């Protein structure tokens, strides 16, 4: 099969021929239509997650996939060949990722593809959608709350806005002024990031926000603690050290039930996936460059088949 591989940490990703992966007992083999691109993909390939993740070489990057079930393991009863699925296909180690024609996905990470989404949209949903969903749960965000979402126009942030809106949560979202209308279209009240952010948030929520989600890091983390009513409801996906200040750190985990719930929201018309850029698999280097620049509104995806 064709796959993108990285031979050593930091090497340029290459399109290569690789053997077809085996199908484990509780695994489904997915023929990939679209693979989503996430910052963690190039961070793993650069060796930046070595302290928490075993990485085996050559590495096929990628954890997001939308495709069709090719085979199922002997313990799998939930899916059958021919099923259209999505997955946050992250096992406990990194080697056989989704930037390939075929990928083995643990059944716990798989859900049926939402009928309302295109393949491109479906491929961009799993990791970012689950990160947003699990961050809202970690913050104990609920109907009637006011929540600050930092980097609200990005892939994770845009999902957090929509999930929150569907649950009756008021959202204040940070982004550049040019993206204010985009945030409004997703149900958020936009504020411009940068110097003076805390004062702009307080102008909208004088008593502070009930919870704050940090999807960026840096100054956004400090502002989150400044404007949130309780540090225990400040959540970050960017800074594990947030726990030392009483906040909560989220590293998204595969969750079939939550991914199914996200698909249901999509099919109910309450969640959509904005695909900012679709590139062929061979142009992964350009996709990673766009991801590293950090200015993309929505998701970047790779067309595999």
Image: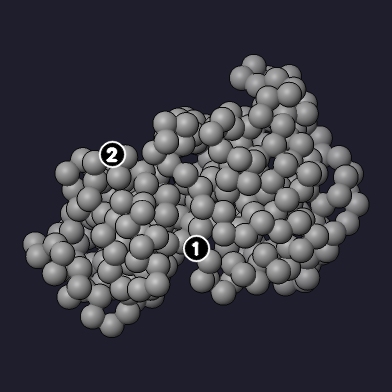
Residue 102 x %, y %: 78, 40
| Quadrant containing the C terminus in the rendered view | top right
Report the disc number at residue 167: 2
Measured from the top left, where is residue 109 in percent x and y? Answer: 58, 36
Comparing labels 1 and 2, the label whose residue is closer to the camera: 1
Q: Residues within 10 Å of mark 2 (few under 14, many from 20)?
A: some
Give me the C-alpha separation between circle 1 and circle 2.
23 Å
> Dot 1: what SS?
loop
- Residue at image position (82%, 52%) is 3
Q: Which residue is mark 1?
A: 297
Q: Position of residue 204 (x, y in %)?
A: 15, 64
In the rendered image, the residue lying farthest to the bottom is: 195
Q: Is residue 167 visible?
A: yes
> Which is more toward the observer, 122 or 217?
122
User: Which quarter of the picture shows residue 172?
Assistant: bottom left
Left or right of 272? Residue 172 is left
Q: What colouring method underlies this structural image? A: one colour
Q: Is residue 197 above or below residue 117?
A: below
């Amino acid at each position: 099969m064709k796959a993108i591989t990285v031979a050593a940490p930091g090497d340029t990703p290459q399109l290569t021929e690789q053997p077809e992966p085996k199908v484990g007992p509780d695994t489904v083999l997915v023929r990939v239509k679209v693979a989503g691109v996430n910052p963690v993909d190039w961070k793993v390939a650069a060796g930046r997650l070595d302290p928490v993740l075993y990485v085996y070489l050559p590495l096929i990057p990628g954890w997001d996939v939308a495709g069709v079930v090719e085979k199922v393991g002997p313990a799998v009863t939930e899916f059958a060949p021919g099923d259209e699925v999505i997955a946050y296909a992250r096992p406990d180690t990194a080697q056989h990722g989704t930037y390939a024609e075929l990928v083995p996905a643990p059944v716990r990470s798989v859900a049926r593809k939402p009928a309302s989404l295109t393949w491109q949209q479906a491929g961009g949903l799993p990791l970012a959608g689950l990160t947003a969903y699990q961050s809202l749960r970690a913050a104990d965000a609920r109907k009637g709350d006011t929540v600050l979402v930092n980097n609200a126009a990005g892939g994770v942030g845009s999902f957090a806005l929509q999930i929150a809106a569907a649950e009756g949560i008021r959202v204040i979202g940070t982004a550049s002024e040019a993206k204010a209308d985009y945030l409004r279209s997703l149900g958020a009240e936009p504020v411009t990031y940068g110097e003076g952010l805390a004062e702009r948030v307080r102008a909208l929520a004088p008593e502070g926000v009930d919870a704050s989600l940090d999807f960026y890091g840096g100054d956004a983390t400090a502002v989150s603690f400044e404007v949130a009513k309780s540090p225990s409801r400040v959540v970050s996906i960017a800074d594990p050290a947030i726990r030392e200040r009483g906040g909560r750190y989220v590293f998204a985990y595969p969750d079939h039930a939550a991914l199914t719930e996200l698909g249901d929201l999509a099919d109910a018309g309450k969640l959509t996936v904005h695909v900012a850029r679709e590139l062929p698999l061979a142009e992964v280097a350009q996709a990673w460059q766009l991801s590293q620049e950090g200015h993309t509104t929505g998701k970047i995806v790779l067309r595999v088949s």
